[in-house]
Image (cartoon, rainbow, N blue to C red):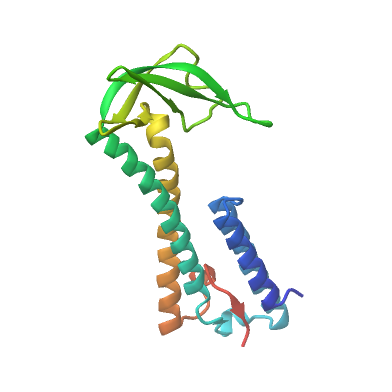
Amino acid sequence: MTDQVTRDRQLREVLEELSAGRLMTGEAFTQVKKLQDAAVAEAAVESPGFATRRTIKKTPGGGIVAGLILLVIGGIFGGVGGFFGYKSIRFELQGKQVEGKVVRMIHGGGKSKGSKPVVAYQVDGKTHEIEGSISSSPPAYKQGDKATVYYNPADPSDAQIGGFVERWLFPTIFGGIGGIVFIVGMAMFFGGLLRKLFGSPLNTADLEGSRFTVG
């Protein structure tokens, strides 16, 4: 049978995969739920009928630790999204606009089929170039297209290509994921804290975000 140590190791592996971006949030929760179900099934074999007459002893701090990990991950994603968002807002409020032209496309290496533009623009008679941050297939631009450029008046080489994809895609993705993970982490953290302080009989809610051992 799968023991507590193995389940804890598997839980840590799931969280590591989630933090590394190799596992989607929904898939991570599915795997955690499977580990919880397996723990309950194992306990039921060892002590039939325990669910109606026994109280599960949860490893102290299990839900709290998992919640803290998700809070950290959510905070990191949110911070990255906030950084990109701040950059776009700064150009919106303090930057100036100029019309540029796509002078060439950069194609992704390897198996990537995406391309991103390189836009040339002029400020005070001097030509600058800026490389797009997003590769897409089909590409958002083609060579010869016109593109709005936001630039820093104090340093015209500090610039950003206009358009939602270039300016707001990263803030939306990182901010959205970070917000969802952070909220889930808060729920797990405070739920685990309340269970640790006051305890509760076994019910469906108790199975969420906890590790189990049978007393």
- Residue plotted at (44% across, 79% down): 195
Write down the quadrant of residue 99 in the picture.
top left
Q: Where is residue 22 shown, x and y percent of the image?
A: 61, 50
Write down the quadrant of residue 181 in the picture.
bottom left
Q: Total number of numbered labels?
A: 0
Is 157 situated above or below 186? above
Write down the quadrant of residue 97 in the picture.
top left
Q: Nearer the viewer, residue 28 or 133?
A: 133
Q: Nearer the viewer, residue 141 or 37?
A: 141
Q: In which quadrant will I find the N terminus? A: bottom right
Tell me if residue 113 can be seen: yes
- Residue plotted at (45% across, 49% down): 177
Q: Where is residue 7 shown, x and y percent of the image?
A: 67, 71
Is 152 situated above or below 125? below
Q: In which quadrant will I find the C terminus? A: bottom right
Asked if residue 202 lies left or right of residue 17, the reply is: left
Q: Where is residue 65 shown, x and y percent of the image?
A: 50, 72
Q: Nearer the viewer, residue 126 or 118?
A: 126
Q: Where is residue 131 shown, x and y percent of the image?
A: 46, 28
- Residue plotted at (41% across, 31% down): 166
Is 162 situated above or below 36? above
Residue at the farthest left position: 93
Asked if residue 134 lies left or right of residue 99, the reply is: right
Residue at the farthest bottom position: 215
Residue at the farthest right position: 1
- Residue plotted at (49% across, 14% down): 143
Tell me if residue 138 can be seen: no
